Image (spheres, rainbow, N blue to C red):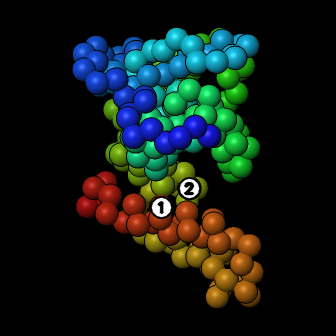
Amino acid sequence: MATRNPRMHGKVEGAAGPCAVPGCKQPGEYKAPIQPANFDGPGRWRLMCLDHVREHNNGYNFFEGWSAEEISEAQSPLAGWERATRAFAHAGGDPPPAWRDFSDPLDAIAARFRRQREEDARSRFTRPERRALSVLGLGEATDRKALRQRYSQLLRRYHPDRNGGDRSHEKRLAEVIEAYQTLKTAAAFA
Ligand SMILES: [Zn+2]
């Protein structure tokens, strides 16, 4: 890896235009590499907002929880791609889409963005709350009682103190607890 450069590689200072994802009103401040099928070096860029450059670069969840600075550093030429590739190899859950699956990743991001806005308009829950519901296997119709029931059911299933000492579900248990923490204060339950 190249020496750490404190400069923000990915963020473009003074960028004035909007994000490249159609319909997104956020400022396009981050470089999203346009990667051709035979990518062999840093190429052209498209400017996107932070949320969308995260999606663009990560197959939707790779940068979740990263700071803007970490993302920028990962975008430094070549070193960033190498790091991204390694991280992909260890990522759990659904495999992120491969670059070769898209003729243009922007198409996939824009489609997802439209779908999310439709869901925002339809749902009683915020986006993080909807993610939490899906972790718990719950839907839109969930009320506070159903949330608590599901939570205790999953705690019994995954907690080693309650399932005979099986520690193999610790990651899942942490996700369940986090999802419950997110949902227990949901405005939809107020
Ligand atoms: Zn955007």
**Where does the image place residue 19, in percent across and percent down from the top left?**
35, 19
Kind of residue sitting beneath label 1: Ala
How far from the left and from the top, in percent, is residue 58? 57, 34
| Residue 124 quadrant | top left
Do callouts 2 and 1 mark residues in contact (Cβ within 8 Å)? yes
Nearest the eye: 131 or 98 = 98
Q: Mark 2 points at which residue?
A: 135
For the point 56% across and 68% down, the residue is 174
161 up-or-down from 111: above or below: below
C-alpha distance separating marks 2 and 1 = 7 Å
* Image quarter hosting the N terminus: top right
Q: Which of 79 and 70 is in front in this view?
A: 79
Which quadrant of the figure has residue 135?
Answer: bottom right
> Does any atom of ligand 1 lie closer than 8 Å to the CB of label 2?
no
Q: Which of marks 2 and 1 is nearer the N terminus?
A: 2
Q: Is residue 185 visible?
A: yes
Compared to residue 183, the image places residue 109 above or below, namely above
In front: 127, or 5?
5
User: What amino acid type should be assigned to the residue bearing mark 2?
Assistant: Val
136 on left or right of 65? right
Q: Which mark is residue 110?
A: none
Q: In this view, does 69 lie above or below 144?
A: above
Secondary structure under badge 1?
Answer: helix
Q: Residues within 10 Å of mark 1 (few under 14, many from 20)?
A: many
Lateral position of residue 129 relative to residue 88, left or right: left
**Where's the C terminus, which quadrant?**
bottom left
Total labels drawn: 2
Return the residue found at the far front: 3
Q: Residue 179 carries which label?
A: 1
Task: Please indicate, yes or no, whether residue 60 appears anywhere in the rendered image.
Answer: no
Image point (56%, 26%), residue name: 77
Q: Is mark 2 on a helix, strand or loop?
A: helix
